[in-house]
Image (cartoon, rainbow, N blue to C red):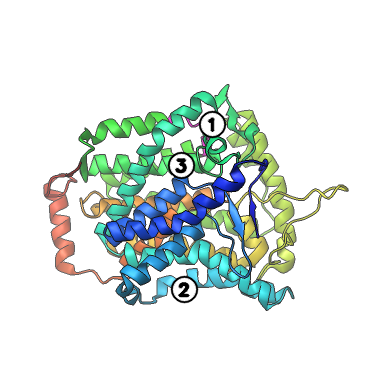
């Protein structure tokens, strides 16, 4: 048994980290005893994601104990104790099939690579704890529009809470994780950019922090424009949104900037033209990119690199070229085990020099293809995107996105789409988005009453894209 802490120096981190990690389950139980169950789930996931250390405790026969698994264990235990009837609300449906396949893929990959049933079961548990359990909790806890609104509000408030911490690290450099937990979880050289510092706070990297703050800012803009919320802590929502925008601009992450621009563009196109076309175009673009890169050998990145060179700084282009070179090697290797992949133990990577150096797997899609094959790759993206497709195409079209009741669900669905776009370039598992996906999956499977649909559309037309009700205040 031991902790995995990148670059962990000997010292107090060896004491503070396990104490905090093991105390989190009692904290989750306390939250359930003190607050309504849904609110406790939001506080548990966001509290862990924002403030627990980047650490992993290796225990025998169970998945590594980290901030995600600690939260999932705590919530499952609390549900058994305080809200056991909640489990009966889950009914397996067609939209759950891709997630079930994605969670079961590691077992098949281990068996087909002669790694044995024990390895397969161990990796299956790990995949289920990281993806399946947050999705399942989303299915049973955030299966209504009001539930998704609570989750969206939690993300927005989490972004506001992180504002002063981000500004501190912009000024003094990323130090908070080291100060509190005695360790810095990432390469410090990557935190220096454009003559300043890129904050990290308590997340794995500056990229992960920027992606979260992008989501919080986008939700804030959506709340503001749809009139869902007028005030938070007696402060006008517009002021808070501008605070988030300014803070987000200081994070120095060009990828997150690009996703934010796409998200805002999607928001205003939906508002002006009543269409979800940008979301579906993003999904089509992802599908084409993955098909060309994973399924064919004819793709050339030269034209894309030349185009991007006119937009992004040279150091970012060099980083992207390095990524493409690695991906080309990794995909060629993955095609040797194309159906179910190479399994674990770094078998999906390739040695590239005489010193044992190996290719770098930066993107989630490359990891999924290499370890779990084309079945894993398709099920991974389908598990996150099929609920969004179902929600927008059959239940809540873009004409309802700014209805006061629907706005939060629409914002989260767009953010999930942007998250999967980011997974084309990065490999950051975020349980908050998986949690939201589970809730959206439940909504997507619910039958929609025709009369309710007509009333919602009538309200949107009469109030100029605002709901007939005034926005609420949060004090």
| Nearer to us: label 1 or label 3 | 1
Question: Which residue carries the number 2 mark?
Answer: 97
Rendered image quadrant of residue 309: top right
Q: Label 3 vs label 2: CA separation?
A: 28 Å
Query: Crowding at label 1, few (<14), some or many (≥20) Cα neighbours within 10 Å?
Result: many
Rendered image quadrant of residue 179: top right
* 253 drawn magenta: yes
Question: Which residue carries the number 3 mark?
Answer: 259
Query: Crowding at label 3, few (<14), some or many (≥20) Cα neighbours within 10 Å?
Result: some
Q: Label 2 vs label 1: CA separation?
A: 39 Å
N-term-proximal mark, 3 vs 2: 2
387 left or right, relative to 225? right
Taking the spot 52% from the left edge, 43% from the top edge, the residue there is 203
Query: Crowding at label 2, few (<14), some or many (≥20) Cα neighbours within 10 Å?
Result: few
Taking the spot 29% from the left edge, 51% from the top edge, the residue there is 408
Asked which secondary structure carries label 2, the reply is helix
Asked which secondary structure carries label 1, the reply is loop
Question: Which residue carries the number 1 mark?
Answer: 198
Give the extent of the magenta segment: 248-255
Q: Label 1 vs label 3: CA separation?
A: 18 Å
Q: Position of residue 384 (x, y in %)?
A: 46, 61
Q: Are marks 2 and 1 in contact (CB under 8 Å)?
A: no
Q: Are marks 1 and 3 in contact (CB under 8 Å)?
A: no
N-term-proximal mark, 2 vs 1: 2
226 left or right, relative to 73? left
């Amino acid at each position: 048994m031991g902790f995995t802490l990148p670059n962990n120096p000997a010292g107090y981190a060896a004491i503070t980290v396990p104490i905090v990690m093991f105390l989190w389950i009692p904290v989750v139980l306390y939250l359930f005893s003190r607050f309504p169950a849904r609110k406790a789930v939001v506080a548990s996931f966001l509290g862990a994601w924002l403030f627990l250390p980047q650490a992993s405790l290796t225990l025998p026969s169970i998945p590594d104990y980290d901030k995600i698994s600690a939260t999932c264990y705590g919530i499952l235990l609390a549900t058994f104790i305080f809200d056991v009837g909640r489990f009966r609300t889950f009914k397996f449906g067609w939209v759950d099939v891709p997630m079930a396949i994605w969670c079961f893929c590691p077992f098949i990959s281990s068996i087909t690579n002669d790694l044995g049933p024990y390895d397969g079961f161990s990796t299956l548990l790990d995949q289920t704890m990281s993806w399946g359990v947050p999705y399942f909790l989303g299915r049973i806890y955030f299966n209504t529009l009001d539930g998704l609104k609570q989750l969206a509000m939690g993300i927005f408030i989490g972004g506001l809470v992180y504002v002063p911490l981000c500004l501190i690290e912009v000024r003094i450099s990323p130090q908070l994780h080291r100060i509190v937990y005695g360790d810095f979880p990432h390469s410090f050289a990557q935190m220096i950019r454009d003559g300043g510092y890129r904050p990290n706070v308590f997340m794995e990297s500056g990229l992960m922090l920027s992606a979260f703050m992008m989501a919080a800012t986008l939700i804030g803009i959506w709340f503001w424009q749809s009139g869902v919320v007028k005030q938070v802590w007696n402060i006008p929502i517009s002021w808070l949104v501008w605070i988030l925008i300014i803070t987000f601009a200081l994070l120095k992450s060009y990828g997150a900037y690009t996703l934010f621009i796409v998200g805002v563009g999607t928001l205003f196109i939906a508002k002006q033209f009543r269409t979800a076309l940008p979301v579906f175009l993003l999904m089509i673009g992802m599908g084409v990119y993955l098909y060309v890169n994973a399924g064919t050998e004819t793709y050339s990145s030269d034209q894309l690199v030349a185009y991007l060179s006119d937009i992004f700084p040279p150091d970012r282009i060099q980083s992207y070229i390095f990524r493409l070179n690695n991906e080309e090697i990794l995909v060629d290797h993955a095609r040797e085990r194309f159906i179910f992949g190479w399994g674990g133990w770094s078998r999906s990577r390739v040695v590239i020099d005489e010193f044992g150096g190996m290719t770098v797997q930066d993107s989630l899609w490359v990891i999924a293809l290499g370890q779990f094959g084309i079945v894993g790759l398709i099920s991974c993206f389908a598990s996150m995107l099929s609920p969004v497709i179902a929600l927008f195409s059959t239940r809540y079209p873009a004409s309802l996105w700014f209805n006061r009741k629907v706005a939060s669900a629409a914002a989260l669905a767009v953010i999930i789409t942007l998250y999967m776009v980011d997974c084309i370039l990065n490999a950051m598992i975020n349980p908050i988005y998986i949690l939201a996906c589970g809730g959206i999956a439940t909504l997507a499977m619910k039958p929609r009453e025709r009369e309710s649909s007509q009333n919602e559309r009538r309200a949107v037309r009469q109030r100029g894209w605002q709901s007939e009700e005034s926005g609420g205040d949060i004090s």
